[in-house]
Amino acid sequence: MDLWEILRDVLILLTAALLLGFVMQILRQRPVLGYILAGILLGPHGFAVIHNQKAVEDIAYLGVSLLLFAIGLEFSWSRLRSFGTAGLGGGSLQVLFTGGAAYALSIFLGVAPPMAFVLGAVTALSSTAFVLRLLAERSELDSVQGRHAVGILLLQDLAVVPLILVVEILVQGGGAGAFFLRLGKALLVLPALAAVFVILFRLVLPRILKTSLVHRNREFLVLLAAVTALGSSWLAHHLGYSAALGAFLAGMLLGDSPFATQFRADMGALRTILVTVFFSSIGLLADPRWMLEYWFEVGLLVLCVLLGKTIIVTVVLKLFRLTLAHAVATGLCLAQMGEFGFMLATLGKGAILDDHLFMLIVSATIVSLFFTPYLMAGAMPVGRRVDRILSFGRSARSRPGAAEASGEAACAPEVVLIGFGPAGREVAARLERLRCRLLVLDLNPKIPDIAREYGFEGQVGDASQIEVLEHAGITGAGIVVVALPHPETVSHVVENVKALSPKAHVVARSRYNIHRHRLERAGADLVVDEERMVGLRIAEDVEAYLEDI
């Protein structure tokens, strides 16, 4: 296969995705829908421009792995525990109940058991890549419904491994003995994989990151981020697990590291490109003519899946005593069919699924993905309305409202201090007495340890990058202090902070008087002019000396 032909296809796909993404943005729709539409138009059932569809799909799944690595950096083990039994335990029940209901309904309709199993497995899985991306765009990863959706998605991704094993055995026609043999082998390898990841990402990599050699050359951090994300994906795939799951576990193990912020930013551009290819590759599988011909079957399946999964997720989360509003909102977030369903359907195509059923699954999945942005946008309003209708006058105090919302935002820092040199440490020493929630952000790998001595959280990251500021929680901070010495960098950081959080009060350090007005134009609310402050201090000392004599 010619590398340049593959590059040509990827370039054409990205160009079409860019143009249609712009169109969707102008129409006030999600750009992701434009990416999928680009794949539909350029695929074999559209204008047939893409010739290396299999290679594009392989690149696309690499994009999913990088997305889950970045999300894993957001969800450390300590944060994962905060999901509790409702997110993680609910995920197990959701997979069992949804898959079981779809299997039972298929058997009732006369579908053969192997085919019914594939239908149940495909229906049980939601779109991890799509939902996580939309939650991140909507800043809802830390919301109640966001946390529970992520917990359930994690369990779904874990369930992909045994589901793939079962489908492969059904395709090969193996008996129960072959099934349990392969499943046992996979379960034995999993602890070894986890142990290797713990050693690498909890013991070895943090020591490398703290060396002065890495700190002096920013390229090393970028290369380490790429090797970590891609290497964990390859290792998991090589051992027979989902590459996306391996990348997520690696990211999660690094989530407690102060370097998580910078890693996430360094992988940002590559991740964006590959994830865009992924969403476009979904469209390559669609056949618009087939969908129009069998519109009733597609529509009926989509309706059953969206309603059924919403109801099942709601019931499951209510068993764990989640409020009805948030249970319904989580159900709407997870109502679609997911990308790993494509993988299962492709494995079963021919041996288990005929062409008609395969196209029905593909078409229903794509249509359900198109509905997802609108379902998620209306998730909480619909959840609250269902809660009001079914509450029958329940007291307002027992309903989710402002108190919960404020609780969700309570984790955001009140003050973000960018730069922890002598000037930044003076600021921290004063603020230490106020016991405020302060986050220190600096490129020096030793800063997190020093910040902890002051009682503050510290993260390693380049504040001139938008993604680093987002990850640091700039949007929730009331005050941002930019104490960096370099005027160009300070101006750039101030502009980025104001772009992300226009209401934040920005205090900027100006090393020279000549740069003061430039920082004010960049958006700084208060500029501390070092030359002026030095002059005032000298004048005060001279006055005090003259008064004494």
Image (cartoon, rainbow, N blue to C red):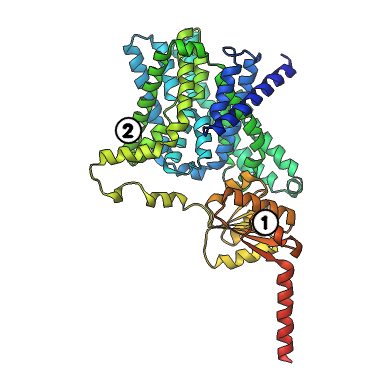
On screen, residue 325 above or below 417: above
N-term mark: 1 or 2: 2
Query: Considering only vertical position in the picture, is 367 above or below 289?
Result: below
Q: Would you say the residues marked 1 and 2 are in contact, meaning their CB atoms lie under 8 Å apart?
A: no
- Secondary element at tag 1: helix
Residue position marked by numbered label 2 in the rendering: 315
Disc 1 marks a residue whose amino acid type is: Arg
Q: Among all residues in the image, which is located at the extreme left?
A: 392
- Between 547 and 522, the one lying in front of the other is 522
Residue 482 x, y percent position in the rendering? 65, 58
Q: Nearer the viewer, mark 1 or mark 2?
A: 1
For the point 38% across and 39% down, which residue is it? 381
Residues packed near mark 2 inside 10 Å, few (<14), some (14 to 19) or many (20 plus): some
Considering every residue shown, the one lying at the far front of the view is: 27
The answer, for residue 512, to whether it is visible in the render is no
Name the disc covering residue 396, or none.
Answer: none
Give the spatial CA distance, label 1 vs label 2.
53 Å
Residues packed near mark 1 inside 10 Å, few (<14), some (14 to 19) or many (20 plus): few
Indicate the quadrant where residue 144 lies.
Answer: top left
Amino acid on which disc 2 is placed = Val
Q: Quadrant of the N terminus?
A: top right
**Left or right: where 128 falls relative to 296:** right
Horizontal placement of 391 versus 65: left or right? left
**Mark drawn on residue 521:** 1
Q: Residue 283, position in %: x, y?
A: 55, 20
Q: Position of residue 192 (x, y in %)?
A: 57, 31
The residue at the point 71 percent across, 62 percent down is: 516
**SS at mark 2 in the image:** helix
Q: Nearer the viewer, residue 62 or 548?
A: 548
